[in-house]
Amino acid sequence: MLKVEGINVYYGNIQALKGVTLEVNEGEIVTLIGANGAGKSTLLKTLSGLLKPKTGSITYLGKSISGKAAQTIVKAGISHVPEGRRVFANMTVEENLELGAYLRKDAAGIRADLDRVYEIFPRLLERKKQASGTLSGGEQQMLAMGRAIMARPKLLLLDEPSMGLAPLFVKTIFQVIQEINNNGTTILLVEQNANMALSIADRAYVIETGRVVLSGTAKELQASEELKLAYLGGH
Ligand code: ATP
């Protein structure tokens, strides 16, 4: 579904991605694991058109999307939930959710997905008329995910969805990610919480200072001594 081949991405003179190659097959959950500053967010931003690779190629459903505008990429079915939520603070919860569907025209489908988001996150239903800026951090995270679901993406890019959430809620978020995947959305997931990410992923890539250094099935990586020491708390 998505093929990234040898991309090099720079911020000015700083090279953040160095020849990154990876792929995501339809129906998979693929996770990117790596320390702070490894380049994970940079990769997602490049896939969603917020950054342009200097060289290398990105192919999605058989077509090149490298260097395409973010709007074009969203239209093609890729949604990005960035780190740090980014909801529209002055709009209500429901307005934010509706905005997620702004490119869609199927009113009945939009209504059904809105109901589904409220079913997944009852808290958002309770607060649908509330200004989004007054939601708690965890609630804003739910809203950002709900808005992405409303876009009915084929491929969902999730950047640290568990960041700053209470442990109990982290479990819920991972269940939601699995449910979204079961409903037919392919997922590329960036997570600091490597244990949790591997528990729901099919495959994973480990990124260190802008390079892919390890990849395999989630099972293989869970068993990898190298990974255990560096990212899985050493047990
Ligand atoms: P984290 O887990 O801490 O979010 P990450 O793996 O997502 O880390 P990136 O945010 O992709 O890392 O950053 C990769 C590198 O690029 C880092 O060294 C970072 O300092 C650098 N970088 C990111 N954004 C910019 C920017 N706008 N200008 C310059 N350098 C940047």
Image (spheres, rainbow, N blue to C red):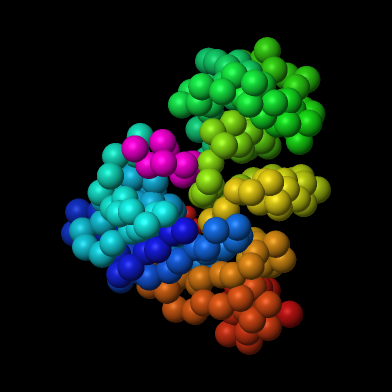
Residue at image x 26%, y 64%? Answer: 56
Closer-to-camera residue (24/144)? 24
Closer-to-camera residue (105/135)? 105
Q: Is residue 80 magenta?
A: yes
Residue reaching furthest bottom?
A: 225
Closer-to-camera residue (11/145)? 145
Residue 144 showing in the rendered view? no
Residue 97 showing in the rendered view? yes
Residue at image x 33%, y 45%? Answer: 49
Residue range of the region highlighted in magenta in the rendering: 72-81
Closer-to-camera residue (45/166)? 45
Task: Tell me residue 11's x, y (percent).
Answer: 25, 54
Q: Image height check: is 110 above or below 198?
A: above
Left of 188 or right of it: where is 207? left
Q: Is residue 116 magenta?
A: no
Location of residue 18 by image quarter: bottom left
Task: Tell me residue 189's x, y (percent).
Answer: 56, 56
Task: Tell me residue 99's x, y (percent).
Answer: 52, 22
